[in-house]
Amino acid sequence: MVEIIAAIIAFIIGTFLGSFYTLAVYRIPIKQDITHERSYCPKCNHKLNFLDLVPVFSYIFLGGKCRYCKNKIRPRYLILEIISGFAFMFYILSLNLDLYNIQFGDIIKMFFGMIYISIFSITAGIDFENRKIEKSMMVFTAITSIIYMLYLYILGVNMYRYVIYFMIIICLLVIDKIKPSYTIDIITYMLLILLYMGTDATLGVIAITFIAIAIKSIINIIRKKEFKPAIGAIFSIVSVCILIVQNFITV
Ligand SMILES: [Zn+2]
């Protein structure tokens, strides 16, 4: 029973996170504040109140329309919130927490999981919309990685590999600063994720990402359609899946 309640709470938190991700994906590329300024309707600019912002429910109760201008809200937001809810619920379940005896280590692990899932989701959204790995997200990921490495250091993990990876990342960031390139951004992003996911999981993610892109490319060649893959987005989505599956297998 407690497990079911915990799963429902995780789902609800996930939908709120999903709602925040869609806002971040919209605002970060246009350099708008994501934490302080209240949400508004993109059609009529009316500020939204708390009830308008409750994920999933507000969409259903308002019939998919803005309360103020009655313009349709894209159902994509609803779908993303629901996906985010399920993803977060499965992530929490994958941790297999002993709810009567939660350890400090579990909370730290959950905290990093939440931060990285957020990084994956927002990076995926921005890359999907703009074919771009957002610089500010990269900096945020780098800072998170440093904190994560400090945590590993405290746990007594051998840091040798991590330091080398991080030096490569810094070199790539410098090169990218001089000559910005999507390819370098993708490689840097993958290395940053490697610091968290570990080598085996990351190689798995890269392999699945490229197989997915290859299949889609072949389909598009047959259909004679142009195709510019959002590599960062596919990589991020596969990462979340692998992260959850890996937890289910190893716990
Ligand atoms: Zn409106």
Image: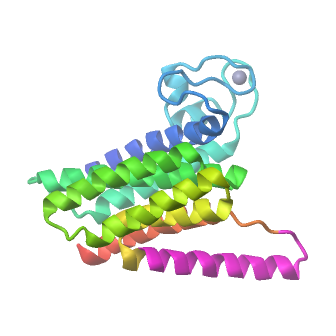
User: Foreground: 38 or 197?
Assistant: 197
| Residue 144 in the image, given as x and y percentages of width and height | 36, 49
Q: Say which residue appears at 70% left-offset and 81% top-offset.
A: 215
Q: Quadrant of ligand 1?
A: top right
Magenta residues (range): 202-226
Residue with the most extreme left position: 101
Kindly indicate the quadrant of the structure image that contains residue 64.
top right
- Specify whether 72 is left or right of 239: right
User: Foreground: 37 or 46?
Assistant: 37
Q: Quadrant of the C terminus?
A: bottom left
Q: Quadrant of the N terminus?
A: bottom left
User: Foreground: 240 or 88?
Assistant: 240
Residue 194 visible, this angle: yes
Q: Say which residue appears at 56% left-offset and 38% top-offset.
A: 24
From the viewer's perspective, is residue 101 above or below residue 204? above
- Specify whether 129 is left or right of 34: right
Q: Main secondary structure of the magenta part?
A: helix
Is residue 65 on the magenta stretch? Answer: no
